[in-house]
Every structure is written in C-alpha cells, then in structure tokens.
C-alpha cells in the first residue's frame, strides 16, 4: 500500500504539487487572516489582503532574484584570471602526485583537447592555412513575429498557470476554512470529534508556527548576511542573502548550499586569501547566532521531528518532487507525524519520524542493562540527575527497570545467566552514581543545618503534573539502617539502591544479600544498634517468605524497626492496605514506594513488637509436657 501511495505521489506530481503548496500556504496565512478578522475586517477583505500581500512579496522577491542571477552570469568570465592564478598557486604548493596537481593536469588535458577540436574544421570548411585569419560568420534565421512571441510565452505558461492555480486554491481554502474542517471531520472522524479536532488543531499549529517562525529566523539570517557580504565586497550580496532565506527552509542541507556560491566567489574575486577567510567566518558567526540565540528565542514549540527523520524526509521529497519538494519536506513530514499521533492506523509514522522517545526511561534503562551498554545507561542516568533527585530517579526509573527484569525472569524470558548479568550491570550503575549520591548527601546535611529541622523538603515545580516532585524526608543523622534483598539477585540490587538513597539523608546504611537471611547465615548479619531493618521484594509471590524472615530478624534485633517494601511501579495500584499487611506479616511498617520506604525507615516511631512470638518453642513445650505425661502413665501401669 505504501508503494502504491508513493507511485501515485510521483505520477500525479503535476496535480499534487500545487495542491500541497496551497495547503501549506493556507496554514501559514491562516493566523494572519484570523488577526485581521479580530481587527473587524470582513472575511473577504481579510483573505484577499493576506493573499495579495503574501504573493506580492513573493513576486518582488522572485523578480530581484532573477535580475541578480542574470548579472552573476554576465560577471563570471571576469573572475577567470584569479581562479587560474589560485589553482596555479595550489599546484605549486602541493606535491607532484597531490590531488590538486592531478586535477590541474586533468583540466589541462581537457583544455588541450577542446582547443584541438576547435582548430579542426569539417570537410565543408577546410583548415585555415598560413596567416589567414578566420572570418566571423553569424547566421540569422528569420522568424515571424508570432513565432518569436510564442518562443517567449511558452516557457512562462507552465509556471504562471501553476502560480495562478495556487493563488485560487489558497483563496478558496481560506474563505472556506471552517467548512472544509467540518467536512474533513465528517469524512474521517465523525465518531470521535475530540480526536479529530485535536489532530486538526495540532497540525495547523505545528505547521503554521514552523513556517512563520522559520521565515522570521531566515530573514534575521539573510539580511545580516547580505549586509556582511556587501561590506566584504562580494558581488551580488543581495542575491546571496535572498537565496539564504530560501535555502534555510531546507534543514541542515540548506545553509550549506547557501554558503557554497558566496565562498566560491570569495575565492574567485580577490587575488589573496583573506576575503575567503572573512566570508567563511561571517557564515560561521551567523550560524552560531541563529542556532543558539535566535531559534531558541523565537521557537515556541518544536516541529516534532527527529533530526534523522528531517534528513530522510528531505532526501525523499527531493527525489519525489524535485527542488520544491526539498523546500516542502519538513512541513509535509510534520503533517504525517501529526497523522500518526492521532490516528492509530498510522501510529508507525509517529514512531519512525517523531522526536519523542519511543521507550519510557525505565524501559530504556532495562534495555541498556540487558545489552551490557553500561556507559550509555550511566550517561542517561547522569543526564536525568541533572534535573532530578537520586530518590526520584531510583523511584521512577531504577526500581521500575528492575521490576521489568523480575517480570521477565518470573515468566522464563530471562535465563539464569542473563538475570545474574542484569543484576551485575545494575550494581555497576549504582556504583557509578556514588559521586552524585555524595554530592546530594552534602547538600542534604547543609539543608538540615540551615533549617534546624528534623525533615527537609525535596521538591521541584513544573508545568506538567509529572514534572512536579515534593516530599519531606527525615534527617537520618545518628541512625543506622540495614537494607536486605528479599529473594533474588534483583532484590539485592533494589536493596543497594535503597541503601544509597537512605545514606543521602545522613544515615549509616548498609545493604545485605538475600542469601544472608537464610537460617544458616542470618546470625552473621550486622544488626547491632540498627534503627531499622528493611526487607525488599520485587515479586509479590516472594512475600510468602517474608513472615518467617521478619520473625528471625526480630529475634536478632528486638529493638529495631522491621519493615517490608513490596516494590511497585509509579502510578500502579497498591495490592493491599499498608497497615493491614503489616499486621498480617508482623512487621512494623510496609511500604510500596521508595519515598515511603525511606520515610518509614528513618521514622522516630518505636517498634510495634517488642518481643517476638515464639510459637515454635510453645509447640515444643506442649509436646514435651504430653510426652512426660505418657511416660508417667506408663510407669504407674
């Protein structure tokens, strides 16, 4: 189907190209018409005024362009001597086998062949002998006035007809804009008015803003360029400034094309090299100012296209519709991306061409860890941590990435070796973030000293709801916390992330493996003086081991708060109420998120159970009592 669509676009170029130009001009002129309508102009007057102004500017622009091009064509032969001299200098400075020397010899051979061909005449015109000079003969072919007029008009008929067609289409589209919108909604989206309206508004906003803002940016680039080239003495500076305005509509490639001919003229006009250097410096300066100052200041929104998509689109539309397709490539591709964003059948266009990440941050981290791409995983984490806190990054990205790994392990998608390798890469990632954690710890300590409070507020405002973050974290100074993995390698990594986060708040925190909780090794745990001991699980099915682990830990550390954390992704529903689950598992607290776990682990509350229930010892005492009774009865008998 896509191949058929491309064939139709190519074969129907003569029809579709004017229509595409008219649609894009309609998007660009619609804000001007709307502004004139708000100024109480009648609809017809607003439309005709906007169209007349736009095409008058384009006509004047084209006229100046044609005049300047013809003047350049007449002046080129005067630069021949400078070009030849500079090529000779490059040949002399280069080696005999250099590229410049080989090119020079090639041009000399071509020039010799041309001269020999010119000096040879046909049999009907014998070679000139001796000192006899050839006569210049000019043949005039008499033409009738009608033929002369026909030769002048015929090349202009096509462009003038296309221009007139575009003007008519633009006028009627602007006059019938609301009617066309209603018809489009009735045709493709009557069952979902909200989505269709949003798509039309999105397309109109993106394309209109892009065209108008790009025009303003190009003018702020082309006018200083023309002035600078004129001051430097480059011929036809006005032409090169105007061409820069046009070519900069072509992303990435356009500025390079606009710079080639002025640089060539700077090479050809002056005998020295200083003019070429100054011209190149002018282009570099204007590019830096345009890309880093003008564009960020003027652009209120992006086009929504990835850089690679812009390049591919430029190549595709140039192949399909020629130079005009090259200029229209970006706005046409923006329309395709908007279509993919709002129409599910074309979602692949948004995925292939859009600039939004197709993977969520936690999915991207999980993929990088699976692919052993630790460097990129660390770079992405450090980039995010420039705007986020460590507790926020682990809660929104790190822990959810481990949850994906645990889900794949539980359903058999990960082998044992892959799971171990994933956990090892995640450990290295946490180690790479130790420096950032130390910086946050110093900042947290300074905040507690300045405020003199037991808690510090960690927050960040944002326009979107997901960009906001505001929590109160307790001071961990003087407290000691032990974080233990629940039942697997990935649980151990989650415990390490939790330990690093708790350490940021000033607490003395360590992490232990799930293997240290087994009965044979649990007594080797360092639980002396611990304020809290936290046991974490990524898999809810592993929680069945938690009650026995809580009992063992409480016997070892009866004065410590014993807590459980069942890791969940942000925004997911919590399986049970925290207090109810804590009662069932005989824990002091149960948490489902990193923030809640840190707050509960550093809380000043006392342990809920001061003494563990020794059910096993009670069963043993009852068994022993019944045994003694049986022995006594047997003795009496």
Image (cartoon, helix red, strand yellow):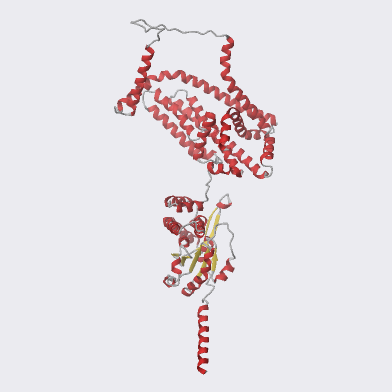
- Of residues 297 and 75, the one nearer the viewer is 75
Q: Look at the picture and state if 611 lies above or below 194.
A: below
x and y percentages locating residue 562 in the rendered image: 51, 70
Total numbered labels:
0
Judge left or right: residue 5 versus residue 389: right
Q: Look at the picture and state if 515 lies above or below 73.
A: below
Quadrant of res 517: bottom left
**Residue appearing at x 47%, y 21% in the figure:** 72
Q: Is residue 89 at least partly visible in the picture? A: yes
Quadrant of res 332: top right
Outermost residue on the front side: it is: 637
x and y percentages locating residue 109 in the rendered image: 34, 20
- Of residues 139 and 276, the one nearer the viewer is 139
Outermost residue on the left side: it is: 96
Outermost residue on the bottom side: it is: 636
**Residue appearing at x 52%, y 89% in the figure:** 630
């Amino acid at each position: 189907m896509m191949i058929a669509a491309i064939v139709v676009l190519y074969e129907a170029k003569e029809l579709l190209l004017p229509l595409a130009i008219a649609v894009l001009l309609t998007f660009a002129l619609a804000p001007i018409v709307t502004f004139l309508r708000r100024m109480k102009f009648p609809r017809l007057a607003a439309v005709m005024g906007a169209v007349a102004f736009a095409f008058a500017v384009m006509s004047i622009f084209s006229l100046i362009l044609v005049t300047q091009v013809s003047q350049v064509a007449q002046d080129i032969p005067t630069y021949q001597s400078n070009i030849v001299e500079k090529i000779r200098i490059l040949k002399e400075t280069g080696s005999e086998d250099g590229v410049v020397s080989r090119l020079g010899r090639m041009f000399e051979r071509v020039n010799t062949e041309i001269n020999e061909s010119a000096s040879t005449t046909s049999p009907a015109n014998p070679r000139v002998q001796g000192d006899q000079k050839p006569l210049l003969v000019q043949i005039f072919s008499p033409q009738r006035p009608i033929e002369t007029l026909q030769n002048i008009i015929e090349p202009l008929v096509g462009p003038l007809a296309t221009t007139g067609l575009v003007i008519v289409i633009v006028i009627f589209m602007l006059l019938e804009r609301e009617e066309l919108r209603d018809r489009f909604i009735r045709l493709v989206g009557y069952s979902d008015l909200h989505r269709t309206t949003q798509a039309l508004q999105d397309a109109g906003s993106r394309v209109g803003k892009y065209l108008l803002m790009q025009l303003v940016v190009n003018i702020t680039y082309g006018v200083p360029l023309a002035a600078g080239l004129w001051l430097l003495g480059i011929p036809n500076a006005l032409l090169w400034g105007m061409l820069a305005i046009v070519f900069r509509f072509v992303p990435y490639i356009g500025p390079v094309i606009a710079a080639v001919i002025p640089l060539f003229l700077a090479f050809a006009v002056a005998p020295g090299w200083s003019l070429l250097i100054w011209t190149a410096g002018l282009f570099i300066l204007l590019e830096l100012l345009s890309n880093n100052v003008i564009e960020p200041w003027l652009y209120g929104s992006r086009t929504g296209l990835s850089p690679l998509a812009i390049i591919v689109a430029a190549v595709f539309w140039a192949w399909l519709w020629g130079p005009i397709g090259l200029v229209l490539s970006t706005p046409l591709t923006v329309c395709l991306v908007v279509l993919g964003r709002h129409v599910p059948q074309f979602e692949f266009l948004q995925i292939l061409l859009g600039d939004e990440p197709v993977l969520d941050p936690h999915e991207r981290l999980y993929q990088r860890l699976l692919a052993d791409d630790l460097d990129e995983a660390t770079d992405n984490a450090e980039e995010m941590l420039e705007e986020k806190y460590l507790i926020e990054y682990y809660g929104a990205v790190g822990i959810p990435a481990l949850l994906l790994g645990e889900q794949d392990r539980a359903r058999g998608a990960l082998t044992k070796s892959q799971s171990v390798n994933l956990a090892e890469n995640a450990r290295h990632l946490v180690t790479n973030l130790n420096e950032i954690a130390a910086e946050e710890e110093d900042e947290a300590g300074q905040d507690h000293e300045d405020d003199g409070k037991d808690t510090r507020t960690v927050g960040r405002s944002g326009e979107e709801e997901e960009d906001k973050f505001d929590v109160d974290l307790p001071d961990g100074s003087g407290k000691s916390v032990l974080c233990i993995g629940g039942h697997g390698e990935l649980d151990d990594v989650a415990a390490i992330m939790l330990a690093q986060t708790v350490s940021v708040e000033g607490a003395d925190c360590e992490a232990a493996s799930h293997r240290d909780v087994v009965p044979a090794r649990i007594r080797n745990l360092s639980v002396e003086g611990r304020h809290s001991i936290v046991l974490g699980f990524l898999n809810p099915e592993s929680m069945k081991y938690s009650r026995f682990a809580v009992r063992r830990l409480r016997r070892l550390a009866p004065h410590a708060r014993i807590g459980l954390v069942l890791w969940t992704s942000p925004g997911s529903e919590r399986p049970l109420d925290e207090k109810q689950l804590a009662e069932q598992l005989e824990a002091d607290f149960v948490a489902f998120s990193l923030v809640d776990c840190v707050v509960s682990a550093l809380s000043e509350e006392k342990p809920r159970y001061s003494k563990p229930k020794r059910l096993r010892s009670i069963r043993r005492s009852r068994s022993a009592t019944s045994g003694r009774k049986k022995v006594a009865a047997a003795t009496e008998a």
